[in-house]
């Protein structure tokens, strides 16, 4: 269960495939970037439910196969245990019903996969899937109920026991019922028009499902081979294959023949690679992709919460439980007012990011603890004949969950072995997510602590110990006494020039960085034979191309690039929006109706993060840095947002020039040659 570090290649491969599929355009048009604006329960119904069902449905079918291939009862000779019992033949009706249950489940799985591949319509596939799983569950529940009764059990009970196959049937029945309920939730949401009657799963999500199916097939086939080679019972071989491929290594079963040990080399390598693909997909999906949506949703919730605390009488806005900020309403320029909106939004982003990290850590920690504690209860009860205490069961759960696998104690009962297979498969995603969440929080804290201690001991750095101490004290003071005043969040225009001066300096610096001396001369030469306006147009084109080239370097930056207010003002000016001009600005709060259905107030959702224009060249929209149209909201990184708008602006401008038109509604381009030289 160790993370082999395959999340990067898996994520990039999924991106490459996804970018070259027609579904990419479909997902975008469906408003994928605005998904988190709707109630989270409907995101869960439209995306998480089919993903979980598509992953655990095949696992349930694998358990059904395990329930079918071996007898359900054993006779225990005197002095032996149920693990070495002699199989008792099952009645024909049990085998027949078990086979029908498996067939229904396989049909349901196939219908779901064909629907996700858009080979079968939603209206046809979903009833088949739901009914198939419910029938499979009902048949297995009936069989398990009968097998637990005196009708099926053989007396004396002390000399007979139920096998692992019986317990696999219990787990399969529970999984079938659970995934059927999840799909019912998905269908209800679709028919109530909360989302389209189609699956909005990405290529990465479908890949995770296929990799899970591949792993289960690999495990079952490998167990069959080693059962024949080593002379093990098939379900004992499944138990061995599980703790081998998941690198737990309990050690109560091990190959002893030369052929078995030889086959172990390719089997273990192939299994670890398969597990690595699954773990990599989970990281890419649940963490690298899922955390962006979770962060965006938490940012939006935090933004709404902050705006709801505005007190115009006291002129305060609350950005935290114990942190209220004062603001002024007069004597400020438009740029200053906008800058303070920007700073508040940055604070909202910071708090939302921190909340997401620690919330994710708490949830994943509770999930791992629940898995260990509940697993310990089951192992404790199943291994009572061995004399296990609860502490011993928890000890076994802990060393297995962390893949330590001492092997000093191990389950020997049929129920314990069967449950271990299911429990260990749940541990893969749980532990993967927990470790990654710890990397964002606990590990980062320890890393910073080690660096801080090193600054006073063996790693003083270039600035020396005194500077490190001063920096630490400054951070402590800032934390204990945060800034209490952000003037101009809701204010009017005035005459102060500090913000305007900073914006001008940033713009000049970026313009100067766009050109080498030869490029600047080429830009001037390109328009030298025309009027000043033509020269400025050519200069503007050069600036757009150069900034696109610069921003492309920021797109893949880690951590994601965050631009200063001055840089944002420069980019917005390139897009035709001047932070000094209040014409297309508005003041918060902005309240939007998030509970929209398709066709109802849909445009308010599509305006999310548009910051001025729905499309380049369209009618301008008034917006605020703290409003829903702020470019700081959404799933896109800041560099991606800027790159997309700059590219669209350049394309629109070049088409306008080709058609012989100047920039719409302007006499001169937003950036002119004189901007580079004026003081």
Image (tube, rainbow, N blue to C red):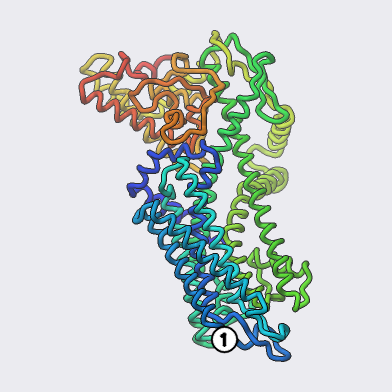
Give the percent coordinates (x, y) of residue 522: 27, 26
Query: Is residue 233 visible from the viewing direction of this image?
Result: yes
Residue at image point 38% right, 55% down: 124
Q: Nearer the viewer, residue 178 or 582?
A: 178
Query: Is residue 459 visible from the viewing direction of this image?
Result: no
Quadrant of the rendered image containing residue 616: top left
Q: Which residue is mark 1?
A: 89
Residue at image point 34% right, 28% down: 649
Q: Nearer the viewer, residue 628 or 58?
A: 58
Mark 1 residue element: loop
Image quarter where the N terminus lies is bottom right
Relative to 37, is 70 above or below?
A: below
Horizontal placement of 184 versus 83: left or right? left
Q: Nearer the viewer, residue 559 or 536?
A: 559
Image quarter where the C terminus lies is top left
**How many marks are shown on the rendered structure?**
1
Give the percent coordinates (x, y) of residue 177: 55, 60
Q: Nearer the viewer, residue 454 or 107?
A: 107
Relative to 111, is 200 above or below?
A: above
Give the percent coordinates (x, y) of residue 593: 52, 29
Residue at image point 24% right, 19% down: 661
Quadrant of the rendered image containing residue 312: top right
Q: Residues within 10 Å of mark 1 (few under 14, many from 20)?
A: few
Relative to 260, is 430 above or below?
A: above
Give the percent coordinates (x, y) of residue 75: 65, 87
- Residue at the extreme front: 151
């Amino acid at each position: 269960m160790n993370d082999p570090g395959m999340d990067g290649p898996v994520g990039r491969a999924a991106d490459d495939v996804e970018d070259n599929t027609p579904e990419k355009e479909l997902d975008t048009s469906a408003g994928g970037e605005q998904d988190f604006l709707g109630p989270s329960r409907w995101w869960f119904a439209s995306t998480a439910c089919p993903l979980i069902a598509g992953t655990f449905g095949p696992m349930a079918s694998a358990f059904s196969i395990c329930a079918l291939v071996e007898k359900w009862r054993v006779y225990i000779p005197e002095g032996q245990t149920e693990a070495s019992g002699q199989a008792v033949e099952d009645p024909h009706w049990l085998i027949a019903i078990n086979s029908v249950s498996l067939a229904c489940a396989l049909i349901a799985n196939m219908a779901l996969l064909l629907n996700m591949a858009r080979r079968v319509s939603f209206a046809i596939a979903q009833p088949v899937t739901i009914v198939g799983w419910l029938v499979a569950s009902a048949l297995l529940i009936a069989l398990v109920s009968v097998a637990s009764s005196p009708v099926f059990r053989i007396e004396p009970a002390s000399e007979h026991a139920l096998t692992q196959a019986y317990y696999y049937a219990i787990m399969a029945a529970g999984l079938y019922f659970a995934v059927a309920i999840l799909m019912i939730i998905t269908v209800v949401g679709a028919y109530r028009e909360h989302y389209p009657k189609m699956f909005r799963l990405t290529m990465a999500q479908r890949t995770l499902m296929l990799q899970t199916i591949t792993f289960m097939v690999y495990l079952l086939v490998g167990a069959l081979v080693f059962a024949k080679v080593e002379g093990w019972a098939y379900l004992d071989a499944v138990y061995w294959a599980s703790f081998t491929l998941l690198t737990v290594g309990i050690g109560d079963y091990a190959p002893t023949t030369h052929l078995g040990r030889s086959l172990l080399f390719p089997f273990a390598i192939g299994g670890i690679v398969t597990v690595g693909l699954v773990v990599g997909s989970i990281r890419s999906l649940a963490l690298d992709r899922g955390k962006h949506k979770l962060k965006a949703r938490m940012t939006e919730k935090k933004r709404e919460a902050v705006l709801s605390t505005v007190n115009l009488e006291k002129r305060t806005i609350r950005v935290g439980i114990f942190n209220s900020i004062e603001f002024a309403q007069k004597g400020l320029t438009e740029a200053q007012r906008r800058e303070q909106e920007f700073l508040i939004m940055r604070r909202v982003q910071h708090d939302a990011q921190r909340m997401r990290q620690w919330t994710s850590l708490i949830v994943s920690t509770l999930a791992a603890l629940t898995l260990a504690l509940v697993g310990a209860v089951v192992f404790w009860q199943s291994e009572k004949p061995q004399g296990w205490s609860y502490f011993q069961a928890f000890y076994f759960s802990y060393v297995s969950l962390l893949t330590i696998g001492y092997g000093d104690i191990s389950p020997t009962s049929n129920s314990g072995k069967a449950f271990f297979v299911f429990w260990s498969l749940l541990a893969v995603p749980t532990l993967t997510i927990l470790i990654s969440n710890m990397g964002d929080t606990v590990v980062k804290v320890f890393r910073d602590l080690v660096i801080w201690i090193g600054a006073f001991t063996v790693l003083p750095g270039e600035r020396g110990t005194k500077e490190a101490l001063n920096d630490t004290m400054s951070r402590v003071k800032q934390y204990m006494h945060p800034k209490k005043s952000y003037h101009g969040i809701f204010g009017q225009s005035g005459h102060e020039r500090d913000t305007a001066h900073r914006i001008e300096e940033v713009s000049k610096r970026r313009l100067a960085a766009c050109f080498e001396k030869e490029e600047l001369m080429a830009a001037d030469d390109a328009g030298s034979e025309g009027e000043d306006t033509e020269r400025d147009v050519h200069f503007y084109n050069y600036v757009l191309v150069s900034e696109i080239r610069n921003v492309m370097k920021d797109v893949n930056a880690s951590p994601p690039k965050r631009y200063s207010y001055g840089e944002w003002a420069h980019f917005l000016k390139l897009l035709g929006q001047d932070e000094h001009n209040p014409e297309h600005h508005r003041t918060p709060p902005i309240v939007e109706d998030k509970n929209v259905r398709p066709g109802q107030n849909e445009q308010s959702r599509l305006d999310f993060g548009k910051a001025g224009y729905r499309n380049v060249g369209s009618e301008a929209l008034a917006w605020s840095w703290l409003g829903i149209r702020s470019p700081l909201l959404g799933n896109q990184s800041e560099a991606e947002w800027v790159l997309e708008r700059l590219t669209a602006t350049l394309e629109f401008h070049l088409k306008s020039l080709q058609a012989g038109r100047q920039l719409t509604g302007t006499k001169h381009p937003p950036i002119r040659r004189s901007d580079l030289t004026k003081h």
